[in-house]
Image: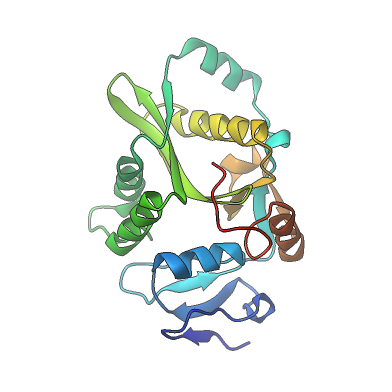
Amino acid sequence: MPCYQLDDELWFPPLEAAEDYGLLAVGGDLSPERLLLAYSLGIFPWYNPGEPILWWSPDPRCVLFPAKLHISRSMHRFMRKHSYRISFNENLPGVIYWCRRLRAGLDGSGTWITPEMQKAYTRLYELGFAHSVECWDGEQLVGGLYGICLGRCFFGESMFSRSNNASKVVLIHLLEYLHHHGFELLDCQQTNDHLVSMGAQEISRQEFLQYLQKAAVPPYGPLVSHF
């Protein structure tokens, strides 16, 4: 299938036009309006430094249902013994910084979190749509994650850990929060062993879109964050 080239107009092609591996479109920008439209349609940006912006809608999609969170016995023991402090929306710029730094490598090219991406998600944070969860060991930020919230769906973007199990701790706290507040799912985008060990599963793109509708994600609900 052809890959669509975006222009200055605010639009995306139909999801069924995506390549088998999930690539849907190229170009456009990282304006708040385009990013929010993308997430509301089940699309996200992901590209490397020096590339044009690439927009993706994978099929299948990796998700975590808050009610199906799996916490191992060893993780339960770890959380009882360690006194990490967890915060919400206390330092999103710091979380993005560490997500980028720990993936960038010596030349800074090993991450999709470009300076433009940092700026774009910080702007969404200022607008109330991007959110973070932080893990602190004393005054040190040792773990965290960030993502976008629309309706009752949290779209995870990235996480980091600078201390043992810190990323798992923030993910557990986020999922417990989402479950308590009636969220439908946490979008993980891509599958990995770390997420599967905590209960993540793959669903079809069509199922994913149905959950977005159930979660009142625009265009099925108002453009608001319930986080």
Report the side of 11 relative to 17 (left or right).
Answer: left
Where in the figure is residue 148, as x and y percent of width and height? 50, 51
Q: Quadrant of residue 17?
A: bottom right
Q: Is residue 158 visible?
A: no
Q: Residue at x 33, y 50 (%)?
A: 100
Q: Nearer the viewer, residue 169 or 66?
A: 66
Q: Residue furthest top?
A: 81
Q: Furthest-front residue in view?
A: 222
Closest to the observer: 167 or 225? Answer: 225
Q: Based on the displayed image, in which of its 4 quarters is residue 52 positioned?
A: bottom left
Which quarter of the rendered picture does the N terminus lie within? bottom right
Q: Is residue 9 above or below residue 161?
A: below
Q: Position of residue 91 (x, y in %)?
A: 33, 37
- Please give the count of numbered marks on the rendered protein: 0
When the figure is inspected, residue 189 is found, relative to residue 174, above or below; the finding is below
- The quarter in which the C terminus is drawn is top right
Horizontal side of 125 relative to 194 (left or right) equals left
Q: Is residue 119 left or right of residue 42?
A: left
Q: Is residue 220 left or right of residue 122?
A: right
Report whether residue 190 is seen: yes
Would you place residue 111 above or below residue 4 in this image?
A: above
> Residue 146, how many percent across, how many down?
45, 45
Looking at the image, which is closer to me, 7 or 54?
7
| Residue at 52% over, 32% down | 168
Farthest residue, direction bottom: 2
State which quadrant residue 43 falls in. Answer: bottom right
Where in the figure is residue 84, as x and y percent of width and height?
A: 42, 19
